[in-house]
Amino acid sequence: MYLSQYQMVATKRPELYETGRLINRIGNTYQGIVGSQTLSRVSSTYNISMKTHIEYTPEMLKFFKDFIDAQKLYPEIFDIYSDERTPYNSGDNINNSRWIHMNRYNNASMSLADPPGADYQLGWGGYINPTWNAANTKQLSSLLVPIFHDPKQAETYYAEPDEKLFEYTYGCFGRTSD
């Protein structure tokens, strides 16, 4: 039920909303509900890196840490990974992964809106597979992306993490030079 003028909004998992929205950045600039961007297409292949426009700084990684820590409050979200109706791997769970919710493609390319190319912000519900990718029915346009998490490194920040040594800031995050 919506209230007139949206003077009151309820959120089912407020910690996820509050911490997750702060990740929406390009560089260090907060984008609000416009969202963040990936620098490459995310596939369903395991053991790949995902590059974003978000800078690798202690301040930015603290936003991510707060978000992945909030996920521990809602372990039931991880149940989707074992649902046979989804393309997820049932081996991903709260003990070895965290997740981000993202759009696979630029918002405008997934829109049913008129005129084509209109720029819609994060949270708009009319997303589809883009016409240039409509044949790929296994790729969802908006999805929960599991990311690796090493609980032994959950409290560790690395200024220069070494992927060869399996160093991941806060158990999840690496750094690239490009």
Image: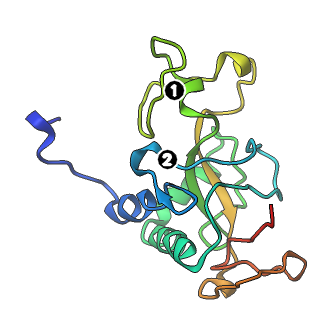
Q: Quadrant of the C terminus?
A: bottom right
* Relative depth, front residue between 4 and 32: 32
Horizontal side, residue 2 vs residue 137: left or right: left
Residue drawn at (36%, 66%) of the image: 15
Q: Quadrant of residue 17?
A: bottom left
Number of the label disc, if any, that sits on residue 153: none
Residue drawn at (64%, 88%) of the image: 156
**Number of on-image labels:** 2
Question: Is 139 situated above or below 73?
Answer: above
> Which residue is situated farthest in the top direction here?
114
* Relative depth, front residue between 8 and 113: 113
Percent position of residue 67, x then y: 48, 68
Percent position of residue 91, x then y: 73, 61
* Relative depth, front residue between 92 and 40: 40
Q: Quadrant of residue 46?
A: bottom right
Identify the residue under disc 2: 35
Percent position of residue 73, x then y: 42, 71
Question: Is 144 situated above or below 121?
Answer: below
Question: Is 154 situated above or below 18?
Answer: below
Residue drawn at (72%, 52%) of the image: 89
Three-letter amino acid code of the residue under disc 2: Gly
Residue drawn at (90%, 78%) of the image: 164
Three-letter amino acid code of the residue under disc 1: Tyr
- The crowding category of the residue bearing disc 1, from other C-alpha atoms within 10 Å (few below 14, some 14 to 19, many at least 20), is many
Horizontal side, residue 29 vs residue 48: left or right: left
Identify the residue under disc 1: 127
> CA gap, disc 1 to disc 2?
15 Å
Secondary structure of residue under mark 1: loop
- The crowding category of the residue bearing disc 2, from other C-alpha atoms within 10 Å (few below 14, some 14 to 19, many at least 20), is many
* Relative depth, front residue between 83 and 104: 104
